[in-house]
Image (spheres, helix red, strand yellow):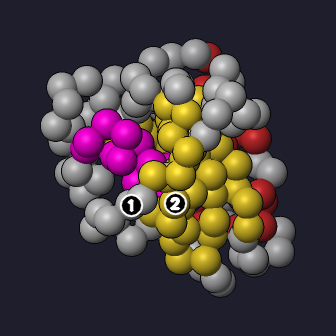
Amino acid sequence: KTLLPGSENFTVESYAGDDANIRSVHKAENGFVIETVTRGYVDEICMLVAVNKDGRVVGLVVCEAHETFGLGSKSLNDHVFLSQFLNSSGTFEITSAVSFSGATGEVVEAGETVGVDGISGATVTSKAIIRCVNSAVAYVTGADAGSGATSWGG
């Protein structure tokens, strides 16, 4: 309920797709909370990513990560890094400069590429988190996570 505001009831949907990053899908009245898992630098990173029915990321949290202390471990609570994903339905990739900030409320449409400023010194961890978020958005929008193409037209 915290990740997907306005939701009251969740039902678990079975997932039989090809995306190995998706562990479980929880459907609510106004969107989905997708549990994703992918390999980081040290171990698997588990995340919950909330995507509303419009395909926008409205909440996310790193549930479990055992990354390098002081570097990748920042992924658990680096609000500046994590907020970059909010209010977007695009495909994320790491850039060298900040080109998107969830704090600005800038809207990025489905299929657009969103530059994310990675966690300094933790590129592998940053890319793992990006894979998790891309998988969750792709599930809701029907996008091909590899290409970013959407089948639903936005």
Residue highlighted by disc 2: 24
Q: Give the overall secondary structure of the magenta segment.
A: helix
**Amino acid found under the numbered disc labelled 1:** Tyr
Query: Per the image, is 108 magenta?
Result: no
Above or below for 81 versus 1:
below
Residue 17 location, quadrant: bottom left
Residue located 73% across and 67% down the image: 64
**Amino acid found under the numbered disc labelled 2:** Ser
Q: Position of residue 94 (x, y in %)?
A: 46, 51
Q: Is residue 22 visible?
A: yes
Q: Position of residue 25 (x, y in %)?
A: 50, 52
Cα–Cα span, label 2 and label 1:
7 Å
Task: Sort mark 1 into few (<14), some (14-19) or many (20+) by Cα contacts within 10 Å.
Answer: few
Q: Say whether marks 2 and 1 touch (CB < 8 Å).
A: yes
Residue 71 location, quadrant: bottom right
From the image, which quarter does the C terminus lie in? top left
Q: Which element carries disc 2, helix, strand or loop?
A: strand
Magenta stretch bounds? 128-143
Q: Position of residue 116 (x, y in %)?
A: 51, 43
Considering only order in the chain, which callout, 1 or 2, is on the residue closer to the N terminus? Answer: 1
Q: Is residue 123 visible?
A: no
Residue located 51% across and 71% down the image: 38
Residue highlighted by disc 1: 15
